[in-house]
Amino acid sequence: MRKLFAILALLGAVGWCAPLMAQDKPAAPAAAPAAAAAPAAAPAAAPSAAAAPAPTPNKGDVAWMLTSTALVLMMSVPALALFYGGLVRSKNMLSVLMQVFVGFSLITVLWCIYGYSLAFTEGNSFFGSLTERLFLRGTFDPVKGEFAMGATFSKNTPIPELVFVAFQATFAAITCCLILGSLAERVKFSAVLIFLTLWFTFSYTPVAHMVWFFPGPDAFTDPKTVDAVTAKAGLIWQWGALDFAGGTVVHINSGVAGLVGAYVLGKRVGYGKESMAPHNVTMTMIGAALLWTGWFGFNAGSALEANGTAALAFMNTYLATACAVLSWMFGEWLFKGKPSMVGAASGAVAGLVAITPAAGNVGIPGAFVIGLAAGLVCLWGVNGLKKLLGADDALDVFGVHAVGGVLGALLTGVFNSPDLIGPGSVQDWVTMKSGYPGIMAQLWIQAKAVGLVFVWTAVVAYISFKIADLLVGLRVTEEEEREGLDINSHGETAYHM
């Protein structure tokens, strides 16, 4: 009971303390935050001119976004849960499923209470307002029967804000769940819930705000006001960093947090001495296949419209993943003598990770290069780099997600160039004209974004783990770890033989 009260007290404290981290600055009544995709994210619909009728949502866009949201939900439960569950030992299978299932649910609730408001409303360069969309207030008026609208990346092309809220909720939830792979087989379930609450609040929401929030294309009406409108955006968006669907926000953010957790937790009992081979590669393959399928919602959905950019993101996601499967497999075949199913599945995830920031930001040649590079670089990340780091990152979250995310973020800056068949990015939001600042200039912007997110999440993760450790302790006992977390933490077993 003491642990339960500690968790409940922490959840309450976070909810009441968050205003200290946010600058409460109500937006105009008609303004509504919108989505995440490159080169900008989370636009907010500007008030329409008094003489012009308000634009109405395109039903095709709304249908595509609802479908994409469901696909991203599938990426976590069941896809990520099965992918991770198959990689651990059988005595810990249910503990991984439980952590992902409940963690996803916890973050979804917190997102709807305060997370969305902190990430996607106007505040300052780091956080949005806590109160503007607290408990999603203002998104629906039951008296008038009216829904608030959020912008897409085209002028006068809104979608219902609640659609965007749900879409981004799945991003927040799966990002938090990705971290759990680094902690597998030795972390307390209560500690997981406390850590996720803290890290989500102080790492995920500000990073999402910094990278993706801007006032929306409709706010850019006059060249004289561009600087003032831009100043309302998140810090990294103001820099001009490109992140179509979450290379920094999702993958670097979670991968670095996972590595910090692996260091703080320490190595599993018997690590390096006992066999810790995956217990069910079939489940891992099924999970990887579902991840690949669901990722089309993740990447192509980040276009926020059913348009050509969504088609480009869809094809790039499809192609880069297939390239990464092949490059990882052949690399493993060359260096280890045999191609493995775990390797092929890991290659697919590596390709998906690396193409995420680039999906709608590069042309087809860029997808080829990013996919092929991701398979080989992440293969090194989970072998050579992992040995250098010396951490027991149980399911290689850092080697795949952080390394793949960094690779994808940097190469996005290169292959966005029209000279390399890239689409360029919007440089003038008043006229919606595309452009490109040059490879070295964009690469430097991308590197700054990567560096800031890397440091931010590392610091927040370390503090969050230490608080969880202080409140309930991070690790189960050695006896419980040897027996397995399934029976000791949850009173169940995955298999009865």
Image: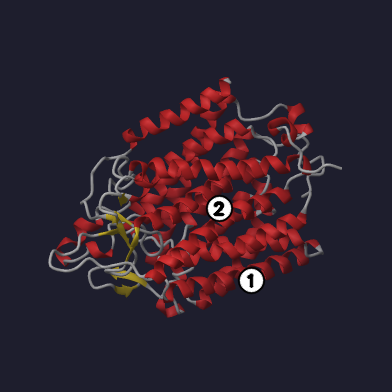
Q: Is residue 332 left or right of residue 32?
A: right
Q: Is residue 340 left or right of residue 461?
A: right
User: Is residue 32 visible in this depiction of the protein?
Assistant: yes
Q: Is residue 346 above or below residue 59?
A: above
Q: Is residue 92 left or right of residue 158?
A: right
Q: Provide the residue designation for mark 1.
A: 322
Q: Is residue 137 above or below residue 326?
A: above
**Viewer-nearest residue: 107 or 480:** 107
Of helix, strand and loop, which one carries label 1?
helix
Q: Residue at x 53, y 33 (%)?
A: 194
Q: Residues within 10 Å of mark 2 (few under 14, many from 20)?
A: many
The percent coordinates of residue 256 (x first, y second) are 54, 46
Name the kind of residue labelled 1 in the image. Answer: Ala
Marks 2 and 1 in Cβ contact (< 8 Å): no
* Residue 402 circle label: 2
Q: Is residue 383 above or below residue 322?
A: above
Residue 228 is drawn in which quadrant? bottom left
Q: Residue at x 66, y 47 (%)?
A: 388
- Most distant residue in the right direction: 497
Going from N to C along the chain, the mark reached first, 2 or 1, is 1
* Residue 446 circle label: none
The percent coordinates of residue 45 (x first, y second) are 27, 60
Q: What is the number of callouts on the image?
A: 2
Q: In which quadrant is the C terminus drawn?
A: top right
Name the kind of residue labelled 2 in the image. Answer: Ala
Marks 2 and 1, how far apart at CA: 20 Å
Q: In which quadrant is the N terminus drawn?
A: top right
The percent coordinates of residue 362 (x first, y second) are 46, 72
